[in-house]
Amino acid sequence: MSAFAFFGALELGLVYGLVALGVYLTFRVLDFPDLSVDGSFPMGAAVAATAIVAGINPWLATGMAIVAGAMTGWVTAFLAVRCGILHLLASILTMIAAFSINIRIMGRPNVALLGENTILTPFESIGDPMLIRPLVVGVLVLLAAFFIIRLLNSDFGLGLRATGVNARMVRAQGGSTSFYTYFGLALSNGFVGFAGALFAQTNSFADVTSGVGTIVVGLAAVILGQTLIPGRKIWVAVTAVIVGSVLYRLAVAFALSSGMFGLQASDLNLVTAVLVAVALIAPKMKAKYKAKQKMQQARTDKEVA
């Protein structure tokens, strides 16, 4: 793998680290199967790109993208909580609607950012852009991770986590599970919208189809990271999903660039499916191996006695 491919994969992995944080919030913390990230990711990209082309400050455009992503999550929560629609179906409806809304925002299927200033532009003059860009994105991801860790370790975060574990207990204590669901989904999709905005600015374009498979990539990062770095503490889990996102992108880049398996760029979804399957199977195989070892040890101790 060339240095260009490595740093490109690192940068993309860090961008999708924000997606992984969002997926972690919904799937792990709230226990809410949210597929609307496939719509909030391109929405963040569409809003940021359209705003930047219109002459709006890139940082303000990125903030607008975060708000747009959060609104997508809020709509999913509204359909699920207020309208009583099944969680999975509510997120699918939001995802479908977001596709048309994104085209409306951009006015066409895609928007180019070539020659436009982005949040990365001021930093690219410091040194080699190939090195500086992943560094800047990494700092932004670390700030987001720090925010999540502080939030989930707070009293409010405890209520948020309890909503996913035992909603009945939260209601018994006078807490509002509906509010926590609204907040959690809005925050999750806000992070995904942030990722979409960074994706558009690092790749110099926004496309309405850029969100296809986002949920799969996010889940792959969460599963892979927590398989390699298991732990119950919040900071460990948050670190794990970001590391998982980076490792996933590096693994995909290596598989596609090595030529060892004859893979092409069109095989990306196949590589993703294999990596997710391995990440899901590995913990079960590890547990079976440990159980088998314990049985053998118990049998040996019994024979010795």
Image: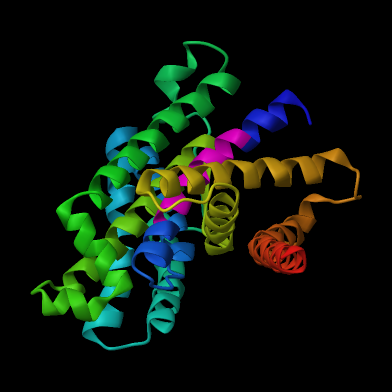
Quadrant of residue 128 in the image? top right
- Examine the rendering and report whether any part of residue 47 can be seen: no
Front residue of 297 and 219: 297
Q: Main secondary structure of the magenta part?
A: helix
Residue 72, image x, y percentages: 33, 65
Residue 221, image x, y percentages: 56, 53
Give the residue at x 47% y 37%.
201
Give the residue at x 43% y 58%.
24
**Left or right: 231 with respect to 80?**
right
Residue 203, image x, y percentages: 56, 38
- Examine the rendering and report whether any part of residue 289 can be seen: yes
Does the magenta segment cover residue 20? yes
The correct choice, above or below, for 48 with respect to 4 in the image is below
Residue 87, image x, y percentages: 38, 80
Quadrant of residue 275 in the image? bottom right
Give the residue at x 47% y 52%.
20
Total numbered circles = 0
In the rendered image, the quadrant that contains the C terminus is bottom right
Q: From which residue to which does the magenta span run?
A: 10-22
